[in-house]
Amino acid sequence: MSQVPSVPAPQTSPASLEPRDQLPPALVPDVQAIMRRDSWGATLAALARALWRAMTLNRKVTAGSAIVGFFVLVAIFGPLFARQDPLKFTRDLLQPPSAAHWLGTNQGGQDVFTQLVIGTRSSLGWALLTGLIVMGISITVGLVSGFFGGIVDDALSLVTNVFIVIPGLPLAIIAVQYFSRTTLTVALVVALTSWAWGARVLRAQTFSMRAREFVTAARASGEHTGRLIFAEIFPNELSIVAASFITTTIQVLLGVAGLEFLGFGDTNSISWGLMLNGAYTGSALFQAAWWWFVPPGICIALLGSGLALLNFGIDEIADPRLRVSRRRRVRRGKAAAA
Amino acid sequence: MRRLIRRLGLYLLAVWAAITVNFFLPRLAPGDPVAALQQRLQQRGSFNPASLDALRAEFGLNTNDPLWLQYLKYLNNLIHGNLGVSITRFPASVGDVIGQDIKWTLVLLSVSVLLSFSLGTLVGIFMAWNRGTAFDTALSSLMMFFYSILYPWLAIVAVYFLGFNLGWFPFAFGYDTSLTPGWSAEFIASAAYHAILPALTLIVSTIAGWMLTMRNSMVTTLSEDYVLLARAKGLSSRRVMFAYAARNAILPSVTGFAIALGTVVGGQLLVEIVFSYPGIGFDLFQAIQGQDYALADGILLLVIVATVFMNLIVDLLYTILDPRVREGRSVSA
């Protein structure tokens, strides 16, 4: 079942926002060299340097890491600075932004800014967690399918292709409405409907890798199959896994938020999607309470664009043709002048 | 040809899988959905024994048939277009509700998707041609933001600022409700006017994807030798841009189009909800709110089947566009 146009494309669309074959070597730190350092301090310093190097290689990567890093910090430390209980009802109903309520209050008098900060943890956390589940499924299916080939591969590839064709959101709604409408259910359902692309890319890579010498050598030395797949082949695909994790996280962030907007998820917890649901069902629109529904959407789009920037930046590092150097522009200018 | 037959088989399998999931999920779910529903309806005071019977019949829960027989009956019903009875729109059947509302969805969806795809692709071509300029950089960054936008959020913002606040556009329903639906010029004008804002929302939230895909694909193509040769031959810029580069660069966009369809259709459903648009997306929302499983499932199944079908069309298009696929050679782009 490999008769599909082989230009891979993601669930959402741009060619660059999809799992790619390889993470550029410049971005992958030489972990062994770093671990060989004498002291923990030196190891940490080397790790930090490697991270810094990776982050500053490309302007898009720098901007993307800054945005994503900001939201990660807010998710971790934000709740410590929350000045109000985000769920506490007060008498300040639908207040516009003020010194007391930086982003105003909603219909129940709850502080929107506090909800936004607290919601970061839930939205980002669920996106990352679901992204991990998706990668888990993709890795298992992709590696097993690519490694064994034959009937196993045919069967798993068929399932993969079926999941690629079926639209995710409608299937997710069918599934989620029959089970308890918690965020966990939403996350699981989104995970079940978004693993297929990653699996296909990993399958292709594994397929090309299983005949390599180091695998043959490991097999000859009597390693059992599970070890061959997950200890020998898998580490060589970490870069692809890391790259498709970014794509998946964007998809999942939007998918979970979309379902939460529809009213699925824990109604007494706080996340950006649930804030939007609250604003929509509480007709924030017709009470002109823009401060209630504008911020969570902007946060989702910002976090998503941070991740997308990371992805596009990595693409530019990997594919020199995508790099638009300033030199080139100057040269063109000169040519025109001459 | 062999390729198309294999793809067709895959699509049929996908549809069958979706239907089967739809059949088994309510049976796997904890508790009896009908009993739970009965309870909820009674609490709400809108309990109607007839609709409950219809529901039981739809789920096949009132019979002592073995599971496989229930499944066959369910398939038989589906094939005959019998999707059960809607409880929120009782006594209308699900088929009636969908048949009545789907044209709204179809028109809105096809117009906005086609506009967005062609416009986005065209702008992407120009971005790549002028890569590295302020135009390209600014638009790329902006599109990165639009790419990750949540469709319903953009809809809410559009409704609030352009509809509610400025009053430029109507922000709810598909037409002026004082008119009677029909083929009168007045009604069509009203429907078009009401469609502007939802269409705009859909276009803005999907265009970034097409633009960025086309830009990157085009930038890569522009560094190919045949483009250099075309330039060296002294062909006009327009000729090089469209006949040489864009023509080859568009393939990934077409694949992306097929893959993105599911997301776009899902997004359309969400946008309709915000605009209270009379299409099946809004029906779906009401069905979910009212625990109308038959209607929700009918709509979702239809959306899945339609998306799969559109995939097939894109596949055909791909065959026409790419001679390598047409001739059965392997594509290694």
Image: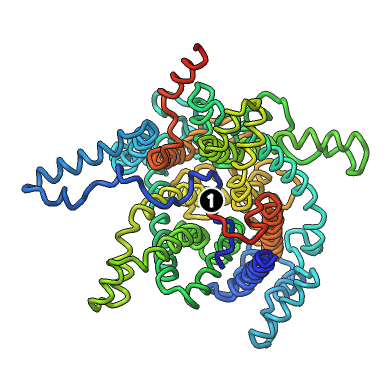
Nearer to me, B42 or A111: A111
Label 1: few (<14), some or many (≥20) within 10 Å? few
Q: Percent position (x, y) of residue A227?
A: 28, 72
Q: Is residue B200 left or right of residue A113?
A: right
Q: Position of residue A110 (x, y in %)?
A: 45, 38
Q: Tell me if residue B224 can be seen.
A: yes
Chain of the residue displaying label 1: B
Q: Is residue B149 visible?
A: no
Give left or right: position of B237 versus B134: right
Which residue is more in the foreground, B309 or A206? Answer: A206
Q: Nearer the viewer, residue A99 or A50?
A: A50
Look at the image and tell me in which quarter the N terminus of chain A lies: bottom right
Q: Residue furthest left?
A: A38
Residue found at x 54% / y 39%: B221
Displayed quadrant of residue A100: top left
Farthest front residue? B233
At horizontal 47% and vertical 55% (from top left) the residue drawn is A266
Q: Residue at x 46, y 15 (%)?
A: A334
- Vertical placement of residue A13 versus A152, above or below: above
